[in-house]
Image: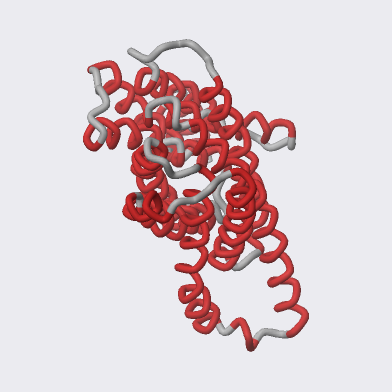
């Protein structure tokens, strides 16, 4: 893969992680009010979908999709629709599990447990017979250790309902990453993102009508949180995730996206005044180191640690020739 391409798409994933990390604050803030979880998700997901419609129309016109051959266009749109529906169903489950889980625990702890997909993605990949670089094998435990220091030190180790909901959310998000990894190279990424929000939003609104009694005052009081989660977390971050994952290694993608746990603690500390100890600061450093290691080309490491004897033998062969 072209190095510039990989760095550009890594940047997309990094921006998505930052936006998501801050979004934990808006989600927790909203759940401290009378606003229901299905109400919050239903509205913000629909906002995310609607905000992308102009972008979809502009990009499809720019790429000249309507001028493509009918068969090619049909297959392209078919994969985009199927991918969007599947991702929407998964996203609906994951986002609602997370939304109800975050009510009982801090933004930082939610970020840590959610980011456990960093382990789950490569494990799922192994079952799918995907190779994992030894650099990634080194980066994953480093990142997990960093997230532990970052989010768990000073927290209670009791594992209650909230923790269970967020852990289930983490596993579902790992499936979301794998599905996107499969569909992203074949589809209109922005349109698929728009479809997934619409699907997840409609289902959440249906659940809102069944289980909750939405109040306009509560919605208006959380308008800032809803708009940020809708436009920022959905329209911007999830779309960048889909575009960023295109032709990227799924484990590397998971590592970069897991940086949201770092941002969730920092934003929780700054905005919600949640504590940040020296151990948590060290956890941030470990996370960044893990991300850097995951991005290093294997060839560079091989050259650095290449035995001198092997190099001398190669020099001798060159001289003999």
Residue 190 seen from this side: yes
Q: Residue furthest bottom?
A: 67
At 23% across and 17% down in the image, what residue appears?
278
The image shows residue 246 at horizontal and vertical percentages of: 56, 56
The image shows residue 65 at horizontal and vertical percentages of: 61, 81
The image shows residue 285 at horizontal and vertical percentages of: 30, 27
Question: In the displayed structure, would residue 60 be above or below residue 235?
Answer: below
Q: Quadrant of residue 88?
A: bottom right
> Which is more toward the observer, 319 or 128?
128
Question: In the displayed structure, would residue 71 be above or below residue 293?
Answer: below
At 49% across and 52% down in the image, what residue appears?
241
At 41% across and 24% down in the image, what residue appears?
147
At 44% across and 44% down in the image, what residue appears?
35
Q: What is the basis of the colouring in this image?
A: secondary structure
Q: Is residue 321 left or right of residue 273?
A: right
How many numbered dots are placed on residues in this image? 0
> Which is more toward the observer, 317 or 209?
209
The image shows residue 139 at horizontal and vertical percentages of: 46, 27
Q: Is residue 229 left or right of residue 172?
A: left
Q: Is residue 37 left or right of residue 93?
A: left
> Which is more toward the observer, 17 or 30?
30
Residue 135 seen from this side: no
């Amino acid at each position: 893969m072209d190095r510039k391409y990989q760095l550009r798409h890594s940047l997309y994933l990094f921006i998505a992680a930052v936006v998501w990390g801050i979004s934990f604050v808006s989600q927790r803030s909203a759940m401290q009010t009378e606003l229901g979880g299905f109400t919050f998700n239903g509205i913000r997901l629909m906002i995310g979908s609607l905000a992308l419609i102009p972008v979809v129309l502009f990009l499809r016109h720019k790429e000249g999709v309507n001028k493509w051959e009918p068969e090619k266009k049909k297959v392209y749109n078919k994969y985009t629709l199927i991918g969007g529906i599947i991702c929407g169903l998964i996203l609906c489950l994951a986002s609602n599990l997370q939304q109800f889980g975050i009510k009982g625990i801090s933004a930082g702890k939610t970020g840590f447990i959610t980011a456990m997909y960093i382990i789950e993605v490569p494990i799922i990949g192994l079952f799918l017979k995907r190779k994992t670089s030894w650099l990634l094998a080194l980066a994953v435990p480093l990142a997990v250790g960093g997230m532990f220091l970052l989010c768990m030190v000073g927290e209670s180790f009791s594992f209650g309902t909230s923790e269970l909901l967020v852990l289930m959310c983490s596993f579902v998000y790992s499936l979301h990453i794998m599905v996107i990894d499969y569909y992203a190279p074949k589809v209109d990424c922005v349109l698929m993102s728009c479809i997934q929000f619409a699907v997840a939003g409609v289902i959440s609104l249906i659940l809102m009508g069944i289980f909750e009694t939405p109040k306009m005052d509560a919605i208006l009081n959380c308008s800032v949180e809803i708009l940020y989660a809708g436009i920022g977390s959905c329209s911007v971050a999830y779309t960048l995730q889909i575009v960023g994952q295109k032709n990227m290694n799924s484990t590397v993608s998971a590592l970069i996206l897991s940086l949201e746990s770092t941002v969730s603690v920092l934003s929780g500390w700054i905005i919600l005044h949640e504590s940040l100890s020296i151990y948590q600061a060290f956890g941030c450093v470990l996370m960044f180191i893990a991300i850097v290691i995951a991005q290093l080309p294997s060839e560079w490491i091989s050259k650095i640690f290449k035995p001198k004897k092997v190099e001398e033998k190669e020099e001798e062969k060159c001289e003999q020739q």
